[in-house]
Image (cartoon, rainbow, N blue to C red):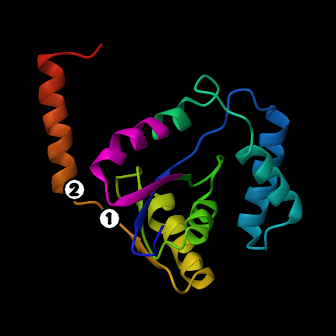
């Protein structure tokens, strides 16, 4: 693969698998919230718990959200012939945005478009956390070009929703 190839990282929110022990999640959330409130550096325990959650084995039954994002990626891939497509998750799921970028760096990809399924304005993930991750990736990989495709054109998105509503009311899916 040459370095002329472009890539897309499709970013989903990420969810918790239904079969993960509640204690793991509770410990992670407690430590994470305390750190964020205090404004301190991430601890090794939080990193360990985050990795445990992200790397938890998942199926379409235990994590339908992950299965859904992967299905969306399968529908998107044929429309992006000139791109390598990776999925990534903002939280709770593997791979993280950084891990997806690490894979692309190993493949000598230079141009990467990051796009999220979190479409509406006002969300902390799409407006704050993902841009911070993109900035960190630019520092980690200065020879790569990272383009965050945000914000969405709300006229285009509202047209998609209106068309879907009109189609749905004519031939219900359920």
Residue that mark 1 sits on: 151
Q: Position of residue 29 (x, y in %)?
A: 75, 49
Left or right of 125 on screen, residue 35: right
The residue that appears at 28% across and 49% down in the rendered structure is 79
Secondary structure type for disc 1: loop
| Residue nearer the viewer, 46 or 136 | 136
How busy is the neighbourhood of tag 1: few (under 14 within 10 Å), some, or many (20 plus)?
Answer: some
The residue that appears at 39% across and 75% down in the rendered structure is 4
Q: Residue 120 got which mark?
A: none
Q: Quadrant of residue 133?
A: bottom right
Q: Is residue 32 above or below residue 25?
A: below
In the displayed image of the protein, which residue is found farthest to the right?
A: 45
Left or right of 78 on screen, residue 30: right
Q: Which residues are magenta?
A: 70-87
Secondary structure type for disc 2: helix
Left or right of 40 on screen, residue 148: left
The residue that appears at 40% across and 49% down in the rendered structure is 117
In the displayed image of the protein, which residue is found farthest to the top?
A: 174
Q: Is residue 30 magenta?
A: no
Q: Position of residue 126 (x, y in %)?
A: 45, 61
Q: Is residue 46 above or below residue 12?
A: below
Residue that mark 2 sits on: 154
Q: Is residue 88 above or below residue 134?
A: above
CB under 8 Å between callouts 1 and 2?
yes
The residue that appears at 81% across and 60% down in the rendered structure is 47
Q: Position of residue 102 (x, y in %)?
A: 62, 67
Q: Position of residue 123 (x, y in %)?
A: 45, 57
């Amino acid at each position: 693969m040459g370095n002329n190839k472009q890539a897309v990282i499709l970013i989903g929110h990420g969810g918790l698998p239904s079969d993960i022990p509640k204690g793991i999640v509770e410990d992670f959330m407690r430590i994470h919230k305390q750190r964020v409130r205090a404004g301190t550096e991430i601890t090794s325990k939080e990193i360990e718990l985050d990795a445990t959650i992200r790397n938890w084995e998942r199926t379409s039954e235990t994590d339908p959200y992950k299965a859904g994002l992967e299905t969306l990626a399968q529908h998107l891939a044929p429309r992006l012939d000139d791109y390598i497509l990776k999925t990534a998750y903002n939280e709770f799921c593997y791979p993280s945005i950084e891990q997806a970028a690490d894979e692309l760096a190993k493949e000598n990809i230079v141009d990467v478009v990051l796009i999220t399924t979190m479409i509406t304005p006002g969300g902390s993930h799409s407006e704050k956390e993902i841009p911070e991750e993109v900035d960190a990736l630019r520092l980690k990989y200065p020879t790569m070009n990272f383009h965050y495709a945000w914000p969405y054109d709300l006229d285009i998105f509202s047209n998609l929703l209106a068309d879907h509503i009109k189609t749905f009311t004519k031939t219900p899916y359920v």
